[in-house]
Image (cartoon, rainbow, N blue to C red):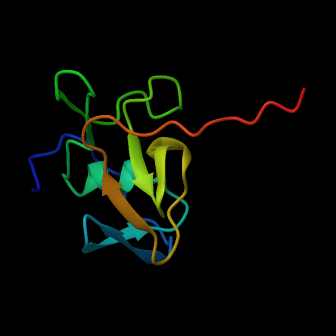
Amino acid sequence: MPTDSNFKRLPANAAAEVVIWVEGKPLKARAGESVAAAVLAAGLGPTRTTPVSASPRAPYCMMGVCFECLMEIDGQENTQGCMTTVAEGMQVQFQRGIRNVPEVEDNA
């Protein structure tokens, strides 16, 4: 699944490493970075496919605007990977196709 990635981290720093699980495989990530950054740095992807045409998508804006980085993180579908900080043992699955949108209770 790894691909050639043009996404590069800044030079090495003293950040601790954490291990997250992506598609059932361990991935070393830097503490404090986003899930999207860890996945891109590892050359993994695409991280989701579109619901209608199954077109591949991957993180793009890295600031929470485009929603191309949606992944299932720790069982929560439709989570923005670029806005989620890695944590030890985190479970990440790529989203393929349509996902459920939770119903909102009307408290009126």
x and y percentages locating residue 65 in the rendered image: 52, 24
Above or below — where is 89 with respect to 47? Answer: below
Whole-percent x, y for residue 44 in the image: 20, 52
Q: Is residue 34 left or right of residue 54?
A: right
Residue 100 place in picture, x, y as percent:
45, 39
Where residue 42 sits in the image (x, y, percent)?
23, 58
Quadrant where the image shows the C terminus: top right
> In this rendering, does residue 10 appear at all?
no
- Residue 25 higher or lower than 54, as above or below: below
For the image, the number of numbered tags is: 0
Q: Is residue 52 visible?
A: yes
In this picture, is 26 found above or below 49? below
Q: Quadrant of residue 48?
A: top left
In the visual, does 10 lie left or right of 55? right
Quadrant occupied by the N terminus: bottom left
Residue name at image x 46 percent, y 70 percent: 90
User: On the rendered structure, is 20 left or right of 82?
Assistant: left
Q: Nearer the viewer, residue 8 or 53?
A: 53
Q: Residue at x 39, y 49 (%)?
A: 37
Between residues 105 and 60, which one lies in front from this camera angle? 105
76 and 43: which one is in front?
76
| Identity of the residue drawn at 62% across and 36% down | 103
Q: At 45% across and 77% down in the image, what residue appears?
A: 89
Picture quadrant where residue 52 is located? top left
User: Which quarter of the figure has residue 59?
Assistant: top left
- Find the residue positioned furthest to the right: 108
